[in-house]
Image (cartoon, helix red, strand yellow):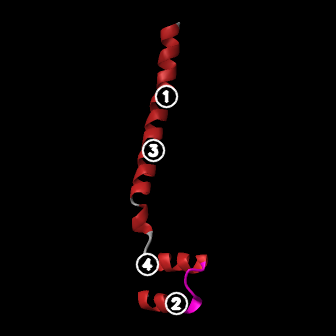
Amino acid sequence: MMSHYMTGSMMFLGPLMWIASIVVFVLILKWIFKDREDRPLEIAKKRYARGEISKEEFEERRKDLT
């Protein structure tokens, strides 16, 4: 009886562990490559939104980058 229970739970937990492993792997990769997503225009937008640069500075940088 106990071995039947263990087999059933392993059949359920096996695929669940694979899915969890894949999710963790993707999240780690996303965290590692996070800085590469910040392109110069995105950085300028964030700085403008935080008030670090003026509208004129933002427009000038946007023109230079596009």
Q: Quadrant of residue 31?
A: bottom left
- In front: 51, or 7? 51
Q: Amino acid at mark 2?
A: Glu
In this picture, is 25 found above or below 12? below
Mark 1: which secondary structure? helix
The mark closer to the camera, 3 or 4, is 4
Q: Which residue is mark 4?
A: 40
CA distance separating discs 3 and 2: 40 Å
CA distance separating discs 1 and 2: 55 Å
Residue 61 in percent (x, y) is at 47, 88
Mark 3 or mark 2: which comes first in sequence? 3
CA distance separating discs 3 and 1: 16 Å
The mark closer to the camera, 1 or 4, is 4
CA distance separating discs 4 and 2: 13 Å
- In front: 2, or 60? 60
Residue drawn at x 46%, y 45% is: 23
Q: Which residue is mark 1?
A: 13
- The stretch of residues the image draws in magenta is 51-59
**Quarter of the figure that contains the C terminus:** bottom left
Mark 4: which secondary structure? helix
Residue 41 in percent (x, y) is at 47, 80
The mark closer to the camera, 1 or 2, is 2
CA distance separating discs 1 and 4: 44 Å
Residue 59 in percent (x, y) is at 53, 91
Q: Amino acid at mark 1?
A: Leu
Q: Which residue is mark 2?
A: 57
CA distance separating discs 3 and 4: 29 Å
